[in-house]
């Protein structure tokens, strides 16, 4: 019987996971970018509301020039968030079963 240690088991588990993940590694990178960018969305969203509040508190002479930047930050952050999660959904679909759709006739 071979000498099996916990280190060998862990190493073999990592080798097994790498063999499974390796063909889809770039899809997994795309899947992991969505949660990271989502973490920054909270800051961008709150920062845009802070800028909007600051613009309204400057006084009665508020103009569109003061509001363009906060509104642009908010809309840009929302568009980026939606785009990143759509990419993540596509990458998840491509990494599961190679992105092949199963015909409904095969499910019966």
Image (cartoon, helix red, strand yellow):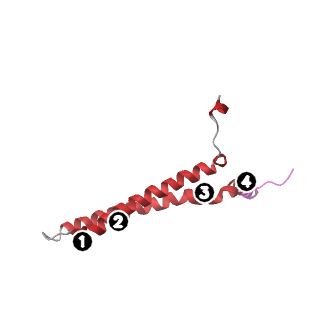
Residue 39 lies, in percent from the top left, at 44, 60
87 lies above or below 60? above
Tag shown at residue 28: 3
Indicate which disc, 4 or 3, sits on the residue closer to the N terminus. 4
Q: Which residues are magenta?
A: 1-15
Indicate which disc, 4 or 1, sits on the residue closer to the N terminus. 4
Which residue is the site of mark 1?
65
Indicate which disc, 1 or 2, sits on the residue closer to the N terminus. 1
Give the Cα distance between marks 4 and 1: 57 Å
Which residue is the site of mark 2?
73
Indicate which disc, 2 or 4, sits on the residue closer to the N terminus. 4
Between circles 2 and 3, the one closer to the viewer is 2
Residue 14 lies, in percent from the top left, at 70, 57
- Residue at x 73% of width, y 57% of height: 15
- Residue at x 73% of width, y 54% of height: 16
Give the Cα distance between marks 1 and 2: 14 Å
């Amino acid at each position: 019987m071979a000498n099996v240690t916990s280190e060998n088991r862990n190493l073999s588990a990592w080798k097994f996971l790498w063999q499974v993940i390796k063909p889809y590694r770039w899809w997994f990178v795309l899947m992991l970018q969505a949660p990271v960018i989502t973490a920054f969305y909270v800051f961008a969203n709150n920062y845009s509301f802070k800028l909007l509040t600051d613009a309204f508190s400057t006084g009665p002479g508020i103009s569109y020039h003061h509001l363009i930047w906060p509104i642009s930050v908010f809309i840009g952050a929302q568009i980026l968030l939606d785009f990143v999660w759509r990419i993540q959904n596509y990458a998840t679909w491509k990494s599961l079963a190679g992105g092949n759709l199963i015909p409904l006739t095969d499910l019966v």
